[in-house]
């Protein structure tokens, strides 16, 4: 039995973008671009489980946001011929929340928990017997008279996704039989994704525009598709049937996104470290307070890409600006006490 995701679990785009995101989502593994090693390992895992006629082992997928963790969960369920239920760690506030979902599953179904690092301790511990023995331990009564009642569950597979694997406890992490890390895409893979999306959206895009959008995508499919839609919007109001590099440049300029995909917040973080903290090191709390942004947002959304392109270094003493970042932003490169550039 396939259960659609609750609409309030994804709030990052407006409703039109959500519909388009679903339309652009791959429906088969051969449509899923990139992450070749992960796909190969999943094909073996799924094929072996089918031969044994057993549910898949529980799966943990981690990596930066926007790389396709949710899409992979859908494809795993579809390839296995089973239903899937979607929720998030933040939405599961008490043991009863996860219990009601688990008891509603059928044999072989999948439960996908996004942002699983946001699970509270009570819900996490409720999952332990469910993952190991397909049962729920329900405590009836209090104190010395309390009794534990076991409720049998269907044989399900938990797929959990996280951008912060270090926040998961060892007992929880060890209960997943398969661990997969998603990496940033390369430019060619993003270009391929954009060409596929343009075809599905029935829009004509020239090669230079594809190159511009891919370069500004932060090597992330979700961002690439979002930028493609914004460039399309700009071209449409200009009554142009073709998305050219000129339209891409103008749309990105209006969005405040440069040729490397840096936006206003990226530049604010880097400039702050340079001007206020002499290039670093500086702690995350200080950065968050100075730019009025949440620490989790900086750590999950901005830092992975800035580190990937070599603009930010994360050390035991704090964050440091690199000379690559200073050069890109046109900032004077400062020297440390030994006269070395930072």
Image: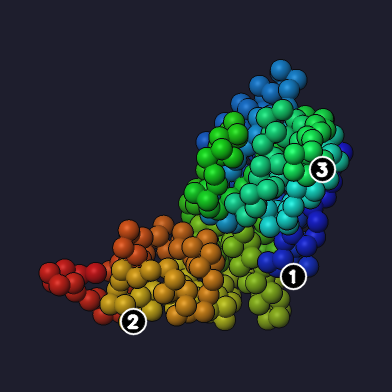
Indicate left or right for 52 with 338 as reference: right
The residue sitting at 69% across, 40% down in the picture is 127
Residue 160 at x, y = what percent? 64, 44
> In whole angstroms, how far apart are the C-alphas of marks 2 and 1?
36 Å
Q: State which quarter of the image contains the C terminus.
A: bottom left
Q: Quadrant of residue 108?
A: top right
Identify the residue under disc 1. 14
The residue sitting at 52% across, 61% down in the picture is 300
Q: State which quarter of the image contains the N terminus.
A: top right
Residue 175 at x, y = what percent? 60, 34
Identify the residue under disc 2. 276
Looking at marks 3 and 1 on the same chain, the residue that comes earlier in the sequence is marked by: 1
Q: Quadrant of residue 21?
A: bottom right
Q: Is residue 185 above or below residue 328?
A: above
Check the image and name the residue furthest to the front.
Answer: 144
Comparing 334 with 327, the one in front is 334
Which of labels 3 and 1 is toward the front?
Answer: 3
Q: How many marks?
A: 3
**Kind of element beneath mark 2:** helix
Looking at marks 2 and 3 on the same chain, the residue that comes earlier in the sequence is marked by: 3
Residue 293 at x, y = what percent? 53, 75
**Kind of element beneath mark 1:** loop
* Residue 252 seen: yes
Which of labels 2 and 3 is toward the front?
Answer: 3
Label 1 Cα neighbours within 10 Å, binned few <14 / some 14-19 / many ≥20: few
> In whole angstroms, how far apart are the C-alphas of marks 3 and 1?
45 Å
Q: Say which mark, if any, is on residue 141.
A: 3
């Amino acid at each position: 039995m396939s259960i659609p995701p609750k609409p309030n679990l994804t709030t990052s785009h407006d409703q039109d973008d959500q519909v388009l995101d679903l339309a652009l989502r791959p429906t088969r593994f051969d449509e899923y671009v990139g992450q070749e090693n992960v796909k190969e390992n999943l094909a073996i895992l799924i094929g072996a489980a089918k031969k044994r006629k057993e549910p898949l082992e529980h799966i943990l997928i981690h990596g930066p946001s926007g790389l396709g963790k949710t899409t992979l969960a859908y494809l795993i369920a579809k390839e296995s011929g089973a239903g899937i239920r979607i929720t998030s760690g933040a939405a599961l506030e008490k043991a009863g929340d996860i219990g009601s979902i688990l008891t509603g599953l059928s044999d072989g179904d999948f439960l996908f928990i996004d942002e699983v690092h946001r699970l509270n301790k009570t819900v996490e511990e409720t999952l332990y017997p469910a993952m190991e023995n397909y049962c729920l331990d329900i405590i009836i009564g209090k104190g010395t008279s309390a009794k534990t009642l076991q409720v049998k569950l269907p044989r399900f597979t938990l797929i959990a996704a996280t951008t912060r694997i270090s926040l998961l406890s060892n007992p929880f992490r060890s209960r997943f039989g398969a661990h997969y890390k998603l990496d940033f895409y390369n430019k060619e893979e993003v270009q391929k994704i954009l060409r596929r999306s343009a075809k599905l959206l029935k829009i004509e895009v020239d090669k230079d525009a594809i190159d511009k959008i891919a370069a500004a995508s932060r090597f992330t499919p979700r961002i690439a598709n979002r930028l493609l839609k914004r460039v399309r919007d700009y071209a449409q109001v200009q009554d142009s049937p073709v998305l050219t590099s000129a339209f891409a440049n103008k749309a990105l300029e209006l969005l405040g996104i440069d040729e490397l995909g840096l936006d206003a917040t990226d530049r604010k973080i880097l400039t702050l470290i340079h001007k206020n903290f002499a290039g670093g090191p500086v702690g995350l709390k200080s950065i968050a307070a100075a730019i009025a942004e949440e620490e989790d947002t900086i750590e999950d959304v901005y830092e992975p890409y800035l580190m990937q392109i070599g603009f930010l270094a994360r050390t035991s003493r704090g964050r440091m600006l690199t000379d690559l970042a200073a050069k890109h932003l046109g900032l004077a490169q400062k020297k440390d006490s030994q006269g070395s550039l930072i």
